[in-house]
Amino acid sequence: MEKFKIDLFEKETGELFPSFQKLNQTDCNICYQHFRKNIKVYDLHESVFDNFQSNGSFIEKYNALDDHFSLLELFADLNLCCDVICINWDEFKTIDVFRTIDLYNYFSDIWFPSADNIIVFPRNMTIFIMIRHDGVIYYVKCD
């Protein structure tokens, strides 16, 4: 999580930013290997996000830029129910773990349109969901 987002949130709201945990590099690598295993055709010359887009399923029903977008509804439609959620920011080099309720409540303070491509997933890595910078959403369910 970039510090400027935390500072901006705290300045604008007067509240503390929701707590989160940053995974260490070993755990990030484990997540990356699991992700690669579940992308059926993984091209090492492409970015993680390009691989996801090429091999994931597009969700036409949702766009994160829509005024009435609900992360809760998206997760419900994908049968994703978990207490904590991981957010991959950059090729699985930085992964933050938030309480899922905090991601629901503060999504617009965490994901910045036009700047952020993120992949969110539960700790058990049964599904990966990519939310692109333009709000377009893809997912991959794991075997």
Image: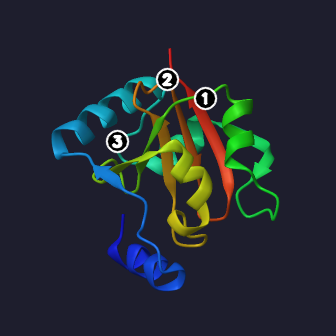
Q: Residue at x 48, y 80 (%)?
A: 14
Q: Residue at x 18, y 45 (%)?
A: 25
Q: Residue at x 57, y 61 (%)?
A: 106
Q: Is 61 or 3 nearer to us in this picture?
A: 3
Q: Are the residues flagged by discs 1 and 2 in contact, CB closer than 8 Å?
A: yes
Three-letter amino acid code of the residue under disc 2: Thr
- Which residue does the numbered mark 2 point to in the structure image? 126
- Which residue does the numbered mark 1 point to in the structure image? 80
| Camera-side mark, 1 or 3 | 1
| Quarter of the figure with the N terminus | bottom left
- Which residue does the numbered mark 3 point to in the structure image? 44
Three-letter amino acid code of the residue under disc 1: Leu
Q: Residue at x 66, y 25 (%)?
A: 79
Real-space CA distance between mark 1 and mark 2, rounded to the nearest whole angstrom: 9 Å
> Does label 1 or label 3 sit earlier along the sequence?
3
Residue 10 x %, y %: 44, 78
Three-letter amino acid code of the residue under disc 3: Leu
Q: Helix or strand or loop: what does disc 2 sit on?
A: loop
- Residue 33 against residue 102 in the figure, above or below: above
* Label 1 Cα neighbours within 10 Å, binned few <14 / some 14-19 / many ≥20: some
Residue 22 x %, y %: 27, 51
